[in-house]
Image (cartoon, rainbow, N blue to C red):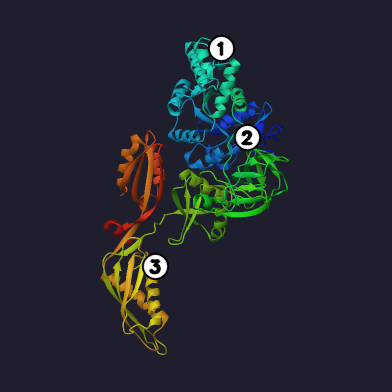
Amino acid sequence: MADKHGRKATEQDLEARGPDRIRNVVLVGPSQSGKTTLVETLLACAGAVPRAGSVTEGTTVCDFEDGEQQHGRSISLAVAPVVHGGTKVNLVDTPGYADFVGELRAGLRAADCALFVVAANDGIDESTRQLWRECDEVRMPRAVVVTKLDHARADFDGVLASARAAFGDKVLPVYLPQDEGLVGLITGDPQGEAARERRGELIEGVIEESEDESLMDRYLGGEQIAEDVLVEDLEKAIARGSFFPVLPVCSTNGVGCAELLDLCVRAFPAPPEHLPPEVFTPAGKAADPIACDPGGPLVAEVVKTASDPYVGRVSIVRVFSGTLDPDTPVHVSGHFSSFFGQDGGHEDHDEDERIGVLAHPFGGQQVVTSRVVAGDIGAIGRLSRAETGDTLSGVELPLVLRPWSMPEPLLPVAIEAVSKSDDDKLSSVLARLSAEDPSLRIEHNAETRQLVIWVMGEAHAEVALDRLRERYGVAVQQVELVVPLREAFTMPSKGHGRHVKQSGGHGQYAICDIEVEPLPEGSGFEFVDKVVGGAVPRQFIPSVEKGVRAQMERGVRNGYPVIDLRVTLTDGKAHSVDSSDMAFQSAGALALRDAADAGSVAMLEPYDEVAVLVRDDLVGGIMSDLSARRGRLLGTDKVGEDRTLVRAHVPQTELARYAIDLRSSTHGAGTFTRSFAHYEPMGADLARQVASRQ
């Protein structure tokens, strides 16, 4: 299948001979560092495409979505396999922009090793540092690729120094630019004093990581260590994730591409060497560990869900065990909320589906295949129920993989359909979008009657709304986000409710007297019956309570629910004929409103507990900003060597754009979490402003 530019993948045998002949490599790094261009150059170098495409012209294999081509940046994960030296290398291209970190995490799950791509004319941002720390925790093998060597402001030595400062002293170059090409520091003949110093530093670093403890003594004793010994120890250290090579690559002329592919094949681990995820039964019990064996039980995971205009929904899967075959039944398990406690539109599900056509993903193209073995990445068309993060397993032995850590979307965007026809389709289309993107959370707020999509940032919101409009033909518009407020009595009060109507025939008669008093926060509602002498017949006392509860839901001043209240029914009157359940409900509601008129009612706003993680040098600015948002600081905690967690209670009304503002003020170095804490009285001036808008 050709892409929409008419480019077609050259004939490659993409069916892996076995797990040992597969490498799954994810490319990560800052936006504009050249990841997609690097993939394109590697594809051309390996003969996977006849010529390299261009990001600016919108002709690359991995940026195949319309939004990517229009904006010139990646917004979703893409897989492009190449065959090098008889080994299949699945290149997983991920977005560098922070809004699409969900796609990045899916790419990390699909891969066994990572290439950190850094531009020679740029530095290393904080999000890349954080990602390196995460990879370090799981000992994922990594290499650093320095691109854009031909840029006017390229500074390879400067970027190398930045990488070592950010990632540690085990980050060392194995090649250096020399004479418009590269020279190997172990296998070549580097020229110049600086290059020879780099060579000595690399050899010492490799020997330190060697499993042969006598090697260092021999080296210090003046023995010349053989190149093949050094190369073998280097490759082992890279595979263990204890040594991180740096390779300079120029995508313009292809310098360094062959060396990079050699490193991927020779030094990066094959899937059987990578620890698989934890496995459970659908009931939540731990299952036996799996191995990367084509003959084992089938266990695969959906790492990407996309919509293809020709074949419909396409599920990109990483096979961890067993073999996927066409036209076979599989069990689909989605247990996101079981592991993380909330579904966000991704409710748990277990059902059987049948695999149709199998393919190898090649950007937006599908190369049909007869099987996908353990360790490989494949594409399945028309799995109607499978979502990103779901597990595919055998029908006879259903299993569930622990999902990877999904980023929490923290930017709320309220939307509404433009027309009735758009509204009819909106819910089903949003369900399809959330199935594709786990970092998109859908909230139907019953209280505010708003439809809210929670996203990672403005660019993420723009992409989601564009997909609604362009892909599914549903037009929506953003509206102001409504924060659910509350009302509460601040002092005891009394109320009289009189509902008497005589208009001929059967009338309505109910009178009740109540006392109200505020309760401590979180106490809820209490109803106390202190009627004596049968002033209110027993059968109508629940009617009074029902009327009071209904009025509390409607509010007594500005239309917001009343909370934390004790209502005591003290007296009343009834009529033998005209009293009824509905009459006493109305009287109870009137009594509560009368008590509000006679007493004092405050408007309450919700507060969230916010935890902001930033570098130590940014703590002062963060604390000042939270205070300016009417926040109340709770304290700080030291995290690691150079970061601090700032905790505070902040009104929800002040957090609507905090995800954007924090990223801007910290240049992407800050992250935060939020969770509901409690309600607090709103300031008098702000309460008047809110009341005036009613």
Give the SS element for disc 1. Answer: loop
- Give the number of the mark in front: 3 or 2: 2
Asked if 66 appears above or below 118 in the picture, the reply is below
Taking 629 as reference, is 130 left or right?
right
Give the spatial CA distance, label 3 vs label 1: 80 Å
Asked if 247 appears above or below 386 in the picture, the reply is above
The numbered mark at residue 189 is 1
Which of the two discs, 3 and 2, labels the residue nearer the N terminus? Answer: 2
Residue shown at 34% from the left, 50% from the top? 650
Residue shown at 31% from the left, 85% from the top? 533
Please name whichever residue, 484 or 611, is drawn nearer the observer in this view of the structure: 611
Instruction: Tell me the amino acid under the disc marked 3.
Output: Glu
Viewer can see residue 468:
no
Please name whichever residue, 625 or 329, is drawn nearer the observer in this view of the structure: 329
Counting labels gives: 3
- Residue 214: x and y in percent read 53, 17
- Residue 173: x and y in percent read 51, 21
Category of crowding for the residue at label 2, using alpha-carbon neighbours closer than 10 angstroms: few (below 14), some (14–19), many (at least 20) = some
Q: Quadrant of residue 141?
A: top right
Give the SS element for disc 2. Answer: helix
Residue shown at 38% from the left, 89% from the top? 576
- Give the number of the mark in front: 1 or 2: 2
Instruction: Tell me the amino acid under the disc marked 1.
Output: Asp
Q: Quadrant of residue 93?
A: top right
Asked if 224 appears above or below 45 in the picture, the reply is above
Residues at badges 3 and 2 in contact (C-beta under 8 Å)?
A: no
Category of crowding for the residue at label 3, using alpha-carbon neighbours closer than 10 angstroms: few (below 14), some (14–19), many (at least 20) = some
On the image, numbered disc 3 is attached to which residue? Answer: 553
Residue shown at 37% from the left, 47% from the top? 610
Which of the two discs, 3 and 1, labels the residue nearer the N terminus? Answer: 1
On the image, numbered disc 2 is attached to which residue? Answer: 272
